[in-house]
Image (tube, coloured by chain):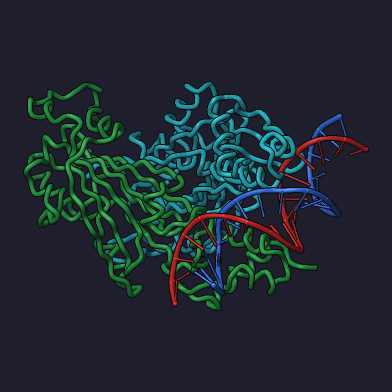
Chain colours: A cyan, B green, C blue, D red
Amino acid sequence: MPLGYHAIAGELRARIERGTYEPGSRLPAEDALAREFDVSRQTVNKALLRLRAEGLVRVERGIGTTVRELPVMTTERIGRQAPAQREAGEARGAFQGELATLGYTSRSEVEVSRERAPADVVRAFEDDDLPEGGHRRRSARERETAGIAIVRRRKMFAGDVPVQLATGYYPAGLAEGTEIEQQDTGPGGTYSRLAELGHAPVRFRERIRLRLATDDEAAFLRLDTEQRVYDVERIASDSNGRAVEVNMIVMPAHQWQLVYEWTTENG
Amino acid sequence: MPLGYHAIAGELRARIERGTYEPGSRLPAEDALAREFDVSRQTVNKALLRLRAEGLVRVERGIGTTVRELPVMTTERIGRQAPAQREAGEARGAFQGELATLGYTSRSEVEVSRERAPADVVRAFEDDDLPEGGHRRRSARERETAGIAIVRRRKMFAGDVPVQLATGYYPAGLAEGTEIEQQDTGPGGTYSRLAELGHAPVRFRERIRLRLATDDEAAFLRLDTEQRVYDVERIASDSNGRAVEVNMIVMPAHQWQLVYEWTTENG
DNA sequence: CAGTGGTCTAGACCACCAC
DNA sequence: TGGTGGTCTAGACCACTGC
């Protein structure tokens, strides 16, 4: 009796874990696997669906099925570093260190633009985080530029593999004309620049969801249609409760684990 | 030309969102849908796979396909409450409040036992979180009961729908003979009891991963084979860096979003 | 028992990629 | 152009549920 697709998925998984199919290499074509296991191609396809959903392989039409290259990586979401060393969505010390251990180099590309912010970002900027639930007074400049944001789109790579997308929004009334509009934001990054403007981020909120990638995201992250992403919305506010950054971070879920660490005491 | 499975998935999704198929109700059988859309049953099946993966529906063999009942819920992982009001994996004020707004009541069941802890939990208990990377001195009692834990298994429901599983481990040398071994741990819960023992949890670490549910978890959470869970490992340590609780929390990923909120200043 | 989804097949046509 | 996966079918048998 031939194997079912669960068993075939298990066998292929074992081969990947044993290294029979090496990271980054191609699996045999579905035809070939169907012959080997003596099942229909559709059964092999279904087995592969499983591995794809797990993030173990990735298929590309016209090319074939490729074994995942990178191990699961960890992202520490609450750094112990001083604010100056922390920038949302940026390759951080810990991350770079971990990659280095694995023999990968990290790299990121940034594009900056000035855009009308999406509705949910505008809402975050207007929805002040004040204990009393009140509202801040807004300056004329702020009112004029409402809804406009400086947008920093960052693509992160581990070696040549794209691993993360982050889109940071900064109120135009605040960031316009500053180094936040430059590719290189200088020592300490955007958070240091915000601090110099009198709006040091001190309060953070991250909201984690799981979803399928959009087409754009899937294309950049080289994601399979079966694969999911963590969708993290990070809002940073200054001591007046004003949201000074909204960051939308997208990571392949099979590629990352998230870590939060905090204390209830001062320390 | 008949529709493809993407289009069919979209149409079914739209019907669910419109309320044509109501939450908790049954979808037409695959046969019936195949006739309606004039495709093979397999094509309908593939469309449903999509909706299952999204968590919009759940299929049970021999029964049918059911529309998800609950909306996506939020779990605030870092409470502003005093430690006494916070217990990992426990129905918290915010959660109960949210459910109440939706017309659901929350409820949980707890089972307590004394067990040999799994390897990763033992490691967490032995791996002290000290800045110097050193080790604590261990008492005789502690050495005798190494590897043994008081285990609190908590099942959470929203209305009648199971929504979360949490398994809390407490070092036997610490928790044995205390109210932590009781079903009802008293006012403030286990964290207050730990505090009374001189081991108030002050440092927390949560590690989030995504994975498929085990068979047991799937059975309890009524999960579809296509659906994923958040696997959260929460470690709580006292001011000496001793891990006093390890909590393994399992949540259907389509059912929850996680929120972390913190400040870099004392506040 | 009838009704439901799970799984499988053999063959087909298509879209996309690299050469 | 040849190879790869995407998708589809018509029919089949099975496992499980509820009556």
Q: Quadrant of the N terminus of chain A?
A: top right
Q: Is residue A102 left or right of residue B159?
A: right
Residue B118's x, y, as percent?
Answer: 28, 35
Q: Is residue B44 left or right of residue B145?
A: right
Residue A52's x, y, as percent?
Answer: 59, 43
Q: Nearer the viewer, residue A40 or B45?
A: A40
| Residue A67 seen in this snapshot | yes
Q: Nearer the viewer, residue B51 or D10?
A: D10
Q: Name which quarter of the figure residue A93 lies in.
A: top left
Question: Is residue B33 shown above or below A247?
Answer: below
Q: Nearer the viewer, residue A267 or A243?
A: A267
Q: Is residue B45 left or right of residue A259?
A: right
Q: Name the residue rendered at 60%, 41% in the picture.
A: A3
Q: Name the residue rendered at 37%, 51% in the picture.
A: B217
| Residue A111 seen in this snapshot | no
Question: Is residue B106 shown above or below C2?
Answer: above
Number of marks: 0
Q: Name the residue rendered at 71%, 45% in the picture.
A: A40
Q: Is residue B11 left or right of residue A35?
A: left
Residue B253's x, y, as percent?
Answer: 44, 54
Q: Quadrant of the C terminus of chain A?
A: top left
Q: Nearer the viewer, residue A87 or B36?
A: B36
Q: Name the residue rendered at 39%, 43% in the picture.
A: B208
Residue A100's x, y, as percent?
Answer: 49, 23
